Every structure is written in structure tokens, then in C-alpha cells.
Image: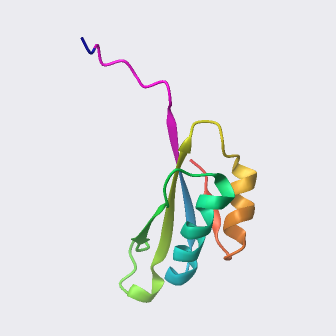
Amino acid sequence: MDNGAVSSTESETHLLVIADREDAEAAAREAVGAFGLAREPEVVRDALAGEDDAEDAQWLVVVVAAAGTLSAGALDAFASRWDGWHEAE
């Protein structure tokens, strides 16, 4: 009987913010090897609040990893390669 217990492998979601779509896609591909991820991160468009111009969109690289395996410093350093940053919660 399933009692709804939480899986033994918890995960965390991290957001990397990158201005250019091609750079965000490259970062997503490279993140798999750099962080030993099970799958490539999703890349999604994030329009800036209140901005009408589509050119002001940023791109989010959504990194899902096992809880406690990625440090903010490592994520910041990785995103900075594309002039981006890790969005801390």
C-alpha cells in the first residue's frame, strides 16, 4: 500500500538567467556534463515584468539536480561563462 511517502531521492530546482537564447541553449547542453545531470535542463523564455519589447526577454535554464549536490558558487561560476547568473531563492 502506498502511503504517499516522499521518495528517498529529493531534488532541487535552480534557475540560471542568461540574456541570449543561443547561449542559454548551449549552457543547458553543457550543464549535463558539468554537473552530472540525468537530463538536459529545460530552457524557457522569461519576459521582464512590465516590458513590452520582446528583445528584453531573458532565458532561464531550469536545472534539476539531487538535493544538496550543486552549490550556489558553482552555479554562479557556470552561468557567468555566458554573462548570466544563478537566481538564488
| On-image quarter of the N terminus | top left
Q: Quadrant of residue 46?
A: bottom left
Residue 87 vertical position relative to residue 83 in the rendered view, above or below:
above
Q: How is the image coloured?
A: rainbow
Residue 17 in the image: x percent, y percent?
56, 67
- Looking at the magenta stretch, what is its main secondary structure? loop
Q: Nearer the viewer, residue 30 or 54?
A: 30
Quick check: 51 left or right of 89? left
Q: Nearer the viewer, residue 62 or 51?
A: 62
Examine the structure image and report whether residue 63 is included in the region drawn in magenta.
Answer: no
The residue that appears at 61% across and 62% down in the rendered structure is 31
Q: Quadrant of residue 81?
A: bottom right
Residue 33 in the image: x percent, y percent?
64, 60
Residue 66 in the image: x percent, y percent?
56, 39
The residue that appears at 75% across and 62% down in the rendered structure is 77
Residue 42 in the image: x percent, y percent?
44, 63
Examine the structure image and report whether residue 8 is included in the region drawn in magenta.
Answer: yes
Q: Which residues are magenta?
A: 3-13
